[in-house]
Amino acid sequence: MDLNLQISSDALDLLSEVGFDPVYGARPLKRAIQQYIENPLAKAILAGKYLPEQIILVETKDRQIMFS
């Protein structure tokens, strides 16, 4: 579908906070990306919310990841 993501620095900061664990390495970060970005975005794409070649903005609001 040639979709593009633009992720705000606030969203990256939130992902790095929830995905940080010095004991387990990158595993918590990978899970955070799956939980907060990949899974909700996949559901929205399957629901037809985004059109081909659209730019999806990933931002935060009240410490929640939002797509627009």
Image (tube, rainbow, N blue to C red):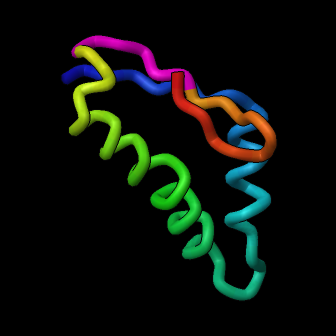
How many marks overall?
Answer: 0
Going 46% across and 59% down the picture, which residue do you hit? Answer: 34
Residue 54 is a magenta residue:
yes
Question: Relative to residue 31, is residue 21 depicted above or below?
Answer: below
Residue 36, percent across and down?
Answer: 55, 53
Decide if residue 46 is on the left or right side of residue 37.
Answer: left
Going 31% across and 21% down the picture, which residue do you hit? Answer: 50
Decide if residue 59 is on the left or right side of residue 27.
Answer: right
- Judge by depth and name the residue closer to the eye, 1 or 39: 39
Look at the image and tell me in which quarter the N terminus lies.
Answer: top left
- Judge by depth and name the residue closer to the eye, 19 or 45: 45
Going 60% across and 34% down the picture, which residue do you hit? Answer: 66
Q: Which residues are magenta?
A: 52-57
Question: Relative to residue 51, is residue 27 depicted above or below?
Answer: below
Residue 30, percent across and down?
Answer: 52, 64
Residue 2, percent across and down?
Answer: 24, 20
Question: Relative to residue 31, is residue 57 depicted above or below?
Answer: above
Q: Quadrant of residue 24?
A: bottom right
Residue 3, percent across and down?
Answer: 32, 22
Decide if residue 27 is on the left or right side of residue 51.
Answer: right
Going 34% across and 37% down the picture, which residue do you hit? Answer: 44
Decide if residue 34 is on the left or right side of residue 17.
Answer: left
Q: Quadrant of residue 62?
A: top right
Task: Find the residue positioned furthest to the bottom.
Answer: 23
Q: Quadrant of residue 49?
A: top left
Residue 29 is a magenta residue:
no
- Judge by depth and name the residue closer to the eye, 36 or 25: 36
